[in-house]
Image: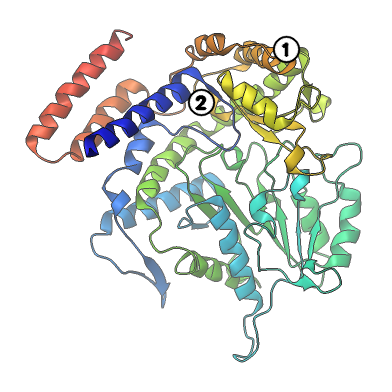
């Protein structure tokens, strides 16, 4: 009975792997496929271990034995992120982008209550500025998300004191910077959160930083880079533009497993220097116990890959996104954004599909044809319930070797599905078969022997290792013959 249940799960797993990795174009902007070695590190021995630690009296104290290896891994990963961001402070123990945001929100409340009398109640943040959800704002930065319970309630409205960035009337995807100063000086937010989930234009970090210098109480500037972490520097470099803290997911445009990260350029001696201490404390013990050590190990390899291939990968992603947008437009689809700016500055391409159906209907139709996107409420939609758009991202298929011209036939297939409701699944599978080799990582001839070593080390007993090696050899022979 157990074997039958397990065989059923394994068979369905294999079928899903083959569908997603061989027959589909994966275009969801918030996903990616990690490299083979990153995946294997995720399931290595640390996946079942603990390494709780915190700073006490200037010394890092670990509360478990057997942690020397993973302690070194965490330090190496932090150093690799120092190189990537160009900053000294990196917190790695958050296990998602949403948790990274929540850690900062918790830390803000603790920091704002420093020095209060012990018998005084904790106060929340007076006000927060962010991007409105229906204008592309990220869910985790909303009161219904990770911001829940961290902002004061306005008694006149009964709602949280959250003010949204103003958007331009002529371009709903860009901030109206002419209205920023008055709004900031009037509402006096203690935290400003940049970043979106529908993300095709830069955020006004420099502008807000300059306005903040005029304020008696300067807000903390936070940039949620969940969607664009892998484009840091090529798209925006918020820590150099004035942001105090950035958060992000390590698995969207970045090459890593599903984790979160917090980084900061707050200098020593800064009036808000204590905020970083609170961020570390809210990461552990405030939000995590075990912080998923297998994915931490995988993340180390992913940062090494990113630091090695950063420039080439980032440039190709942006070129591909702009080419994809142009091809979609040429095939008759309605692409959002500024045509003169190439429609997008990131990996994302937004398409309005209302003339053919709701975003949800079109996303399902595309999925049935092997093109995986997600439906999206556009800035002029009333709510997510009745969405007018679909959101696509080129980052994963860029990593599988697609270049600008390769997105033209894909755009044509999408147009056939969206505009004419044609079935194109076989042609989609045929086209995807051209892009099965992962790039911007070790080539297969270097990666596969290392992968075999990792897998062999996880087997128990010499007979198991021998049987595994024989099966792996047969699999390699089949792959070499193109089976």
User: Would you say the residues marked 1 and 2 are in contact, meaning their CB atoms lie under 8 Å apart?
Assistant: no
Please name whichever residue, 297 or 56, is drawn nearer the observer in this view of the structure: 297
* Residue beneath the point at 60% across and 75% down: 110
Residue 121 in percent (x, y) is at: 65, 85
- The secondary structure type at the circle numbered 1 is helix
Please name whichever residue, 347 or 240, is drawn nearer the observer in this view of the structure: 347
Q: Residues within 10 Å of mark 2 (few under 14, many from 20)?
A: many
**Residue 212 relative to residue 243: left or right:** right
Q: Is residue 238 above or below residue 320?
A: below
Please name whichever residue, 379 or 38, is drawn nearer the observer in this view of the structure: 379
User: Label 1, label 2: how many angstroms apart (C-alpha)?
Assistant: 30 Å
Residue corresponding to mark 2: 399
Please name whichever residue, 27 or 315, is drawn nearer the observer in this view of the structure: 27
**Residue 174 relative to residue 92: left or right:** right
Q: Nearer the viewer, mark 1 or mark 2?
A: 1
**Residue 292 relative to residue 237: left or right:** left
- The secondary structure type at the circle numbered 2 is helix
* Residue beneath the point at 49% across and 56% down: 94
């Amino acid at each position: 009975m157990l074997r039958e249940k397990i065989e059923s799960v394994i068979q369905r797993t294999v079928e899903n792997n083959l569908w997603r990795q061989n027959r589909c174009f994966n275009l969801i902007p918030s996903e990616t496929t990690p490299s083979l070695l990153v995946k294997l590190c995720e399931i290595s021995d640390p996946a079942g271990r603990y390494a709780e630690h915190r700073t006490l009296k200037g010394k890092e104290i670990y509360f478990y034995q057997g942690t020397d290896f993973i302690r070194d891994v965490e330090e190496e990963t932090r150093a690799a992120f120092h190189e990537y961001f160009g900053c000294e402070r990196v917190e790695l123990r958050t296990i998602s982008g949403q948790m990274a945001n929540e850690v900062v929100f918790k830390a803000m409340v603790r920091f704002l209550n420093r020095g209060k009398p012990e018998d005084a109640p904790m106060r929340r943040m007076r006000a927060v500025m962010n991007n409105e959800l229906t204008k592309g704002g990220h869910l985790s930065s909303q009161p219904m998300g990770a911001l829940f319970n961290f902002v004061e309630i306005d008694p006149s409205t009964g709602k949280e004191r959250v003010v949204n960035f103003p958007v331009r009337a002529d371009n709903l995807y860009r901030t109206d910077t002419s209205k920023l100063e008055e709004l900031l000086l009037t509402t006096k937010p203690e935290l400003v959160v940049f970043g979106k989930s529908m993300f095709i234009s830069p955020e006004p970090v420099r502008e807000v930083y300059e306005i903040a210098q005029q304020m008696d109480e300067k807000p903390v500037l936070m940039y949620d880079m969940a969607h664009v972490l892998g484009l840091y520097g090529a798209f925006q470099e918020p820590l150099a533009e004035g942001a105090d803290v950035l958060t992000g997911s390590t698995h969207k445009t970045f090459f890593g497993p599903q984790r979160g990260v917090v980084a900061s350029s707050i200098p020593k001696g800064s009036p808000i220097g204590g905020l970083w201490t609170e961020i570390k404390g809210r990461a552990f013990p405030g939000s995590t116990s075990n912080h998923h050590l297998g994915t931490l190990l995988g993340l180390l390899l992913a940062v090494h890959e990113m630091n090695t291939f950063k420039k080439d990968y980032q440039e190709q992603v942006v070129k591909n996104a702009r080419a994809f947008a142009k091809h979609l437009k040429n095939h008759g689809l309605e692409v959002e954004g500024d045509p003169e700016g190439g429609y997008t500055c990131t990996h994302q391409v937004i398409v309005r599909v209302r003339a053919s159906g709701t975003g949800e209907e079109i996303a399902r139709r595309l999925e049935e044809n092997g093109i995986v996107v997600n439906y999206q409420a556009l800035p002029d939609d009333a709510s997510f319930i009745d969405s007018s758009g679909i959101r696509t991202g080129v980052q994963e298929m860029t990593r599988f070797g697609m270049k600008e011209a390769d997105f033209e036939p894909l755009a044509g297939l999408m147009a056939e599905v969206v505009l004419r409701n044609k079935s194109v699944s076989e042609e989609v599978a045929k086209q995807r078969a051209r892009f099965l080799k992962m790039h911007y990582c070790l080539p297969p001839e270097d990666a596969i022997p290392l992968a075999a070593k990792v897998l062999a080390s996880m087997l128990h007993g010499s007979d198991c290792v021998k049987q595994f090696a024989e099966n792996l050899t047969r699999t390699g022979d089949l792959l070499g013959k193109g089976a």
